[in-house]
Image (cartoon, grey):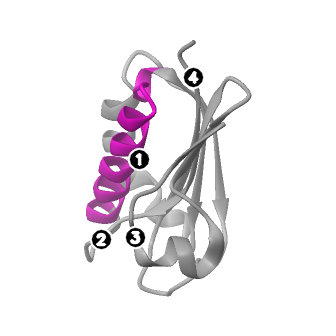
Amino acid sequence: MRRISSGGPYEAKIGYCRAVVAGGFVHVAGTVGQGLSVTEQCKSALDIIGQALTQAGVSFADVVRVTYYLPDRADFEPCWPLLAATFGANPPAATMIECGLIDPKYRIEIEVTALAKV
C-alpha cells in the first residue's frame, strides 16, 4: 500500500491523505477546488485529482469510477463539458449525489477510483 499526500493542512487535522494505492486501485479522496463558480471549482478539483493520479503513475484514462457531490444538482450540468473533456474516450462509471459539503462555499466535490498500473 502507498499513500499520496497533497501536503494540505487538513490531511493531518482530519486524518486522511489525497490518495491511496492499494488492492490494484488508486483511491483518490473527495476533492474540492478553488474559485467562485461551480465550473472554476470543478476545473480546480480535476487539476488536483490529476496531480494525485500522476503521482500514482496513472491518468484520467485509468479512472473506472467517479462520484460527484453537489449541494445543488442544478450546478452539475454546467460541469458536463469539463468532465467530458477530462475523461474523453475513457468515461468511467459515474454517480452524482446531491448533498451538503463541508463548507457552504464549495459547490462540487469529486472522488475517483482508478485502476493501478502493475
Question: Residue 106, relative to residue 22: is it above or below?
Answer: below
Residue annotated with mark 2: 34
**Counting residues from the N terminus, which is met first, the one under dot 2 or under dot 1?**
2
Residue annotated with mark 3: 8
Q: Where is residue 70 in the image (x, y as percent from the top left)?
A: 55, 66
**Counting residues from the N terminus, which is met first, the one under dot 2 or under dot 3?**
3
Disc 1 element: helix
Disc 3 element: loop
C-alpha gap between disc 3 and disc 1 = 13 Å
Mark 4 residue type: Ala
Between 68 and 53, the one nearer to me in the picture: 53
Disc 4 element: loop
**Counting residues from the N terminus, which is met first, the one under dot 1 or under dot 4?**
1
Instruction: Judge left or right: residue 58 versus residue 28.
Output: left
C-alpha gap between disc 2 and disc 3 = 13 Å
Q: What stretch is highlighted in magenta?
A: 39-61
C-alpha gap between disc 3 and disc 4 = 23 Å
Q: Where is residue 35 in the image (x, y as percent from the top left)?
A: 25, 73
**Counting residues from the N terminus, which is met first, the one under dot 3 or under dot 1?**
3
Please tell me whether residue 44 belongs to the stretch shown in magenta. yes
**Residue at screen point 30% across, 49% down:** 47
Mark 1 residue type: Ile
- Which of discs 2 and 1 lies nearer the camera? The answer is 1
Question: Residue 10, relative to residue 69: is it above or below?
Answer: below
Mark 2 residue type: Gln
Magenta stretch prevailing secondary structure: helix
Residue annotated with mark 1: 49
Q: Identify the image quadrant of the C terminus.
A: top right
Count residues near mark 2 (Cα–Cα under 10 Å), then give few for <14, some for 14-19, many for 20+: some
**Residue at screen point 54% across, 48% down:** 19
**Residue at screen point 74% across, 28% down:** 23
